[in-house]
Amino acid sequence: MERPGGTDIRSRGFSLIELVFFIVVVSIGLVGILKVMDVSVAGSADPQVRKQAIALAESILGEVLQKPYTDPDPAQTSGESTRATFDDVDDYNGRGNATFTDLPAGLSTYVISIAVTSTTLGSVPAKRVAVTVTHGAEAITLNGYRTSY
């Protein structure tokens, strides 16, 4: 059957099979694109959490490492229970969030733990300070060494 002008009526459009095949191919492509976007969006906040945890750990590690290697007043064993009275590296051992009460509200969900252990670097006595900051599944541990120089 021909139309005026010589074109066949059956060659004008898409068949139902072609249309269904097109919809299936486009749907598979969209699902693939959406999966890639889902993975990238799910991990997009992680760098910010990691950067904040690193900055917090660096700040705390810097504060601890500025303290003397040994206790300047070893006879005084009481009274060094608050951050304001800490006068050597060992005073921070086993401390956590309760010690750092002046953190901004946005960092209140980060968990802090500090471990101070005695070690040697070659033949030099040292104290290893490990600061761990955890937020959800993300944990950052920074280590520093304090020697008696």
Image (spheres, rainbow, N blue to C red):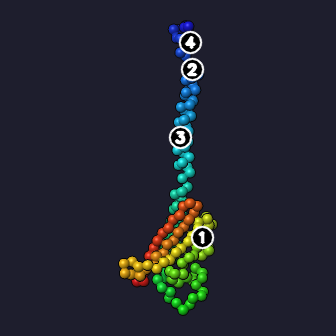
- Helix, strand or loop status at disc 1: loop
Comes first in the chain, label 3 or label 2 = 2
**Callout 4: few (<14), some (14-19), or many (20+) C-alpha neighbours within 10 Å?**
few
Q: Residue at left 58%, top 61%?
A: 136
Comes first in the chain, label 1 or label 2 = 2
- Nearer mark to the viewer, of 1 and 3: 3
Q: Quadrant of the N terminus?
A: top right
**Callout 3: few (<14), some (14-19), or many (20+) C-alpha neighbours within 10 Å?**
few
Disc 4 from disc 1: Cα separation = 76 Å
Q: Residue at left 46%, top 71%?
A: 143
Asked whether 118 or 1 is in front, the reply is 118
Comes first in the chain, label 1 or label 3 = 3
Comes first in the chain, label 4 or label 3 = 4
Disc 1 from disc 3: Cα separation = 41 Å
Is the residue under label 1 in contact with that under label 4 (CB below 8 Å)?
Answer: no
Image x and y of residue 78, in percent: 59, 88
Image x and y of residue 10, in percent: 55, 14
Q: Which mark, by number, is residue 103?
A: 1
Disc 4 from disc 3: Cα separation = 37 Å
Image x and y of residue 86, in percent: 55, 82
Residue assigned mark 4 = 9
Disc 2 from disc 4: Cα separation = 12 Å
Is the residue under label 2 in contact with that under label 1 (CB below 8 Å)?
Answer: no
